[in-house]
Image (cartoon, rainbow, N blue to C red):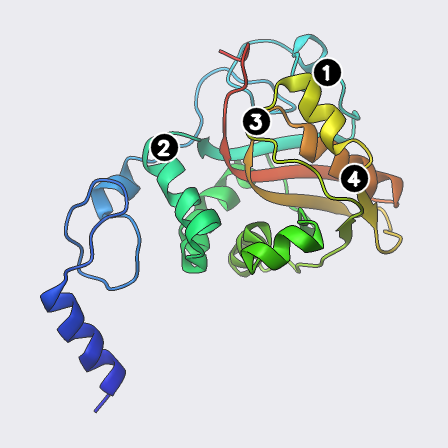
Amino acid sequence: MDVRAVATAVVDAILPPLCLHCGAAMARARPGLCAECLGSIEPLTGSRCRRCDLPRPGEPERCARCRPWSPRLEAVAATRYAGPAGTLVRGLKYSGWRHLAAECADPMGRALSARGITPDLLVPIPLHRARRRDRGFNQARSLAEALGSTLSVPVEDVLDRSRPTASQVGLGRERRWRNVRGAFVARRRLGGETVALVDDVTTSGATLAAAGDAVLGAGAGRAIGVTWALAFAPGDR
């Protein structure tokens, strides 16, 4: 007899697990989204910047978000940071439910495939050691591991966060850029690989740009930011 399975079934019968977003009863024990909420998460569609995926017509040269980026840096996102997609990543990031990263992996992989991108290496965006110690884990690493399993691509912690930075939440575009400029250093030289930089959410793209500069400076041939969700910064709409 599987004692743990029996105990889980008893707990579920007494306290049925609820969807993190809508509160509907679910059949499984671990926190997550119900089938309806998961099914409502859609990929980004419509006219988008061909370099940074921002849903807005125009070329990168006219896109305020990615115009300052290196020409060898691109970004893709699986979905928009809203509704159930936002609930999912908040559960991963702030509640420590690392199993939720598996729900993000397939859509992130499809976003890369839709752009014809096949990375050689997945590199999670690192947390500074003090923040990682407080949180207990790095959500970007969890996403990279889940995506690596889906794509059969290796995951390596190539980058370090060389200094602590303030949270990007609530900062304007210029302050986001100043906050992370020069914040990442590479642990080793790279050899022309296509490196996918994995993170949970991107807004201004400042963090991805800073991390991209670090891996490109270390010898990567191409850097691709791949995130679960794209959030809009003021002026993006």
Q: Closer to the camera: disc 2 or disc 4?
A: 4
Q: Spatial distance from mark 2 to mark 1, Cα to Cα?
A: 27 Å
Q: Nearer the viewer, mark 1 or mark 3?
A: 3
> Amino acid under label 2?
Glu
Image spot of residue 63 (x, y percent): 65, 12
Could you tell me which residue is drawn at 62 percent across and 55 percent down? 132
Residue 90 position (above or below residue 232): below
Residues at marks 2 and 1 touching, judged by CB atoms closer than 8 Å: no
Cα gap from disc 2 to disc 4, whole angstroms: 33 Å
> Which type of secondary structure does the marked residue at label 1 adopt?
loop
| Distance from the alpha carbon under mark 1 to that under mark 3 | 14 Å
- Secondary element at image label 3: loop
Q: Name the residue beneath numbered marker 4.
A: 183
Q: Residue under label 3, please give it.
A: 203
Amino acid type assigned to the residue bearing label 4 in the image: Ala
First in sequence: mark 1 vs mark 3:
1
User: In this figure, which residue is indicated by the disc labeled 2?
Assistant: 42
For marks 1 and 4 on the same chain, the one whose residue lies earlier in the sequence? 1
Amino acid on which disc 1 is placed:
Arg
First of labels 2, 1 by sequence position: 2
